[in-house]
Image (spheres, grey):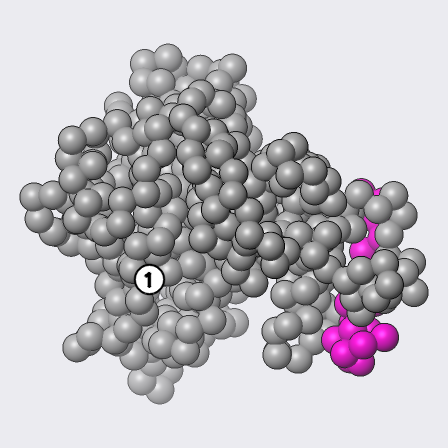
Amino acid sequence: MKMPLQFRLNGNAVSVTIEARVSLLDLLREELGLTGSKKGCDHGHCGACTVLVNGRRMLSCLKLAVSAEGCEVTTIEGIGSAEALHPLQVAFIRHDAFQCGFCTPGQIMSALEVIAEPSPKTRASIKESMSGNLCRCGAYSNIISAIMEVVENGTV
Amino acid sequence: MEPFEYCRPSSVKKVLNVLKDDPRAKLIAGGTDLVDHLKLGVETPSKLVDISSLQLGEIELKSDALLIGALATSSQVAAHHLVLRNAPAVAQALLAGASGQIRNAATIGGNLLQRTRCPYFRSADWRCNKRVLGTGCAAIEAVSDGHALLGTSEACIAVNPSDLAVALLAADTHVHLASFSGERKVPIAEFYRRPGETPHIETAIAADELITKIEVPLARLGQTSRYLKLRGRASFEFATVSVASAMTFEGDTVTAAAVALGGLGTIPWRVKAAENLLLGHPLTKRRVNDFCDALFSGAVVRRGASKLALARGAIHRALLRGAA
């Protein structure tokens, strides 16, 4: 069943017609050409598909695109720019927080919520908060360091 | 994924109308359980009714109860000051579950209705009485520590995976349901159904009903509640064993106790008669062991797979170390 869908994506209005069974992840990647969000498992286990919906981190693989009607969606493409990287992006580079880079967009989108929370942070609490993002290359320690730097300094 | 119709009625009343006219329609809110099942081919609804934008997410106090709307998300409930003060085990149970991303989308109602993680249920390739009644239980021939010891039958040994349900069971919660014909509330102890001969029926909810809210009675006992979850990973994994417990004392003497178990039962597990063994006495290891014996009574251990020792240890830790 094809349905109309209107929402805001990285600050821009989007209007599409889409089948109800299409996930937000597939809409972003296949219809809208935004391949920054990754399909790691397609079942909610890995976090590589993490985006922001109305400012909260969510898994786009478990969200039907049509349920994003009227929402504000932010993907990795909407974070920073080549000329002005986001502090998290700078920190990830500085701390060597990725190897293959496949999990990285999801890690950064997820970390945005971690750095926005006002509660005090330790490496342990960051590790727990980021437990929904897997990294098969094992860059976890550096990912935590990168997030910790932004938590402590705001910018890098 | 099989195709389905999709609608988003703008009010609870309109949703109830849709459910009344089409009992095969399924509700979708956060979708973190259901969309997974749609992809696995485990759920094949002909119509989805999206309730995610309805106004059913309020968290408030009313006379002597904490009311939590069914559409409140796990994140919202776990962070709410009324929950932290009056039912801390509920907040702890929610934060112990899933991941940050899932907690932002998952709702309280959906959490209570989530399906088992039994791999034979989750794969359409295997025989499963819960998925298709009468086909048999593939798990019984390959029992693992992930299967239930309490509340089982020869038709089904699948564990109920909800952390929230365990905490709510210890808190004597009521589940409020609405249908086109009216409203009712069910004590959570009666909300969950053991599999028996009908493992495909998991809760008391009818096909035309919606969970509107849960009602947690306010009590000093509730304020002492805690949730302990043991599992193979430190995070983002379902419980091997979990314990929701609350206790009040007068001096050394236990005056009230509530203990519910997760990870071992086909339903969240609590035996009030067992709790009576703890009342009116100081808390000792011997009494806790007697309590465990009573709580585990009726456990069926198949093929030697048993986590009763782990559950016993968890209860000791929860009651003796965590006693308020």
Q: Does the magenta segment cover residue A144?
A: yes
Provide the residue span drawn in magenta. Answer: A136-156
Q: Nearer the viewer, residue B226 or A3?
A: A3
Looking at the picture, how far across and down is residue B136, in whole percent? 38, 15
Question: Could you classify mark 1 by the number of other residues whose Cα lies within 10 Å: few (under 14), some (14-19), or many (20 or more)?
Answer: many
Q: Which residue is mark 1?
A: B57
Q: Is residue B36 magenta?
A: no
Q: Residue furthest bottom?
A: B251
- Look at 66% across and 52% down and name the residue there: A75
Outermost residue, top side = B135
Residue at the image position 47 percent from the left and 29 percent from the top: A19
Overall secondary structure of the magenta section: helix
On screen, residue A121 versus residue B212, left or right, reads right
On the image, which quarter does residue B196 sit in? top left
Residue B172: name its quadrant: bottom left
For the residue pair B193 and A73, the one nearer the viewer reads as A73
Q: Residue at x 61, y 78 (%)?
A: A119
Q: Chain of mark 1?
A: B
Q: Residue A13 placed where, x, y %?
A: 55, 52
Relative to residue A118, is residue A130 depicted above or below?
above
| Quarter of the figure that contains the N terminus of chain A | top left
Residue B36 in the figure: left or right of residue B271 = right
Which of the pair A23/B87 is nearer the observer? Answer: A23
Indicate the position of residue B256 as horizontal and vertical percent values: 28, 72
Residue B139 in sight here:
no
